[in-house]
Image (spheres, rainbow, N blue to C red):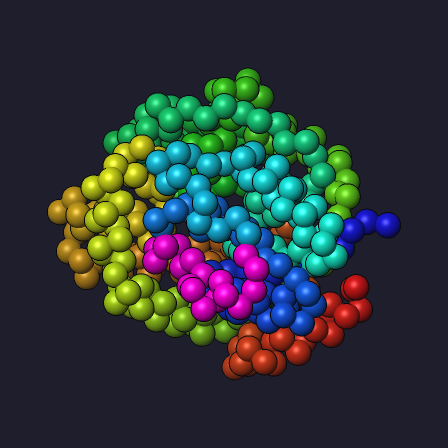
Amino acid sequence: MKAKILAVVGPTVSGKSALAIEIAKRFNGEIICCDSMQIYKQMNIGTAKPDGEELNSAVHHLFDFADPKVSFSCADYIPLAERVVEDILSRGKLPIFCGGTGLYLDRFLSGAEFESTEVDENFRREMNAFALEFGNEALHQKLREIDPKSADEIHPNNVKRVIRALEIYKTSGRTKSEIDRESKEFSSKYDCLQIGIKYEDRELLYDRINLRVDKMMQAGLIDETRKLLEAGVFEANATAAQAIGYKELLSYFNNEKTLICAVEDLKMATRRYAKRQMTWFSAHGNVNWLVADNKNIAELVFEAEQIIKEFI
């Protein structure tokens, strides 16, 4: 029998962390970060990392551990997550993934041995510079020429993923779509129940996003971004430089936009990211969706409990 694990997924600001904590309390669980930015040290406000109260409410793993100056990939994440899951299971507890990085969860659940491909920071910087000079569409065309299937699946404005697909081909000689296809032939050794939070009224989610950005600004996001910039984090790590929450404010520090415009860009980028997350989770994986419109956390927890009790 496969070991049972949980995953709480959905768009940013939907309430995943609160739900995961309540589930952990009720089902003897421990939470595993499934967010590609919350793994980094020093990047706290901009990534909406769990605060002290949340961290004390349940055991958390793989948050706030990676050097922000060093690029961290999905290939790095998988073996770490594997060890954490096995440790949690060995103690008779329930592993609960929580986060919005669908790629990390999908790769973990695929059961395939992750094909490690080299990281080429110089190439990433070169491609980022190319996109800035010639535009995202021109960069996307580079991908289409070598890997049409990945080009169809990755939006031209998702520069980070476009560059990663190009980098995979450059360093391995194989296309991302080829590697993805092979990974789907494997079967996970875990039985994973995915519980998702969604809003049928997108405006409710967008209002939550706008409010969170305002709170992030009040909490000191400007100062946090300045410290990371002065420490050379964004220069050393192209992934961190493209992180929503910091990328938009860099235009302010570079005197390209006013602070008001930069904050509006941040809100818009977050709303677009939430939409992409919903598209991803709807297309990848078997998610049991909880509709959060006009519901409080207690109501969502009750619904989740019924699903989990049947599962375990």
Q: Nearer the viewer, residue 131 or 90?
A: 90
Q: Is residue 29 left or right of residue 42?
A: right
Residue 239 appears in which quarter of the rendering?
Answer: top left
| Residue at 70% from the left image edge and 73% from the top image edge | 305
Point out residue 21 in the picture as x, y percentages from the top left corner: 57, 67
Label total for image? 0
Residue at point 34%, 71% (across, down)? 211
State the image quarter where residue 114 is shown: top right
Q: Which residues are magenta?
A: 44-60
Q: Is residue 69 or residue 248 the one in the foreground? A: 69
Image-based side of 277 in relation to 260, left or right: right
* Residue sitting at x 32%, y 25%: 126
Residue 95: give x, y in percent of width and height: 66, 55
Q: Is residue 201 visible?
A: yes
Tell me if residue 112 is in the magenta stretch. no
State the image coordinates of residue 92 (x, y, percent, origin top left): 74, 57
Relative height, residue 159 to residue 295 (above, below)? above
Q: Is residue 266 above or below residue 109?
A: below
Give the residue at x 61% y 37%.
Answer: 79
Q: Is residue 185 left or right of residue 32?
A: right
Give the percent coordinates (x, y) of residue 221.
Answer: 27, 58
Q: Quadrant of the C terminus?
A: bottom right
Residue that sits furthest to the front in the current view: 91
Q: Left or right: 220 with respect to 37?
A: left
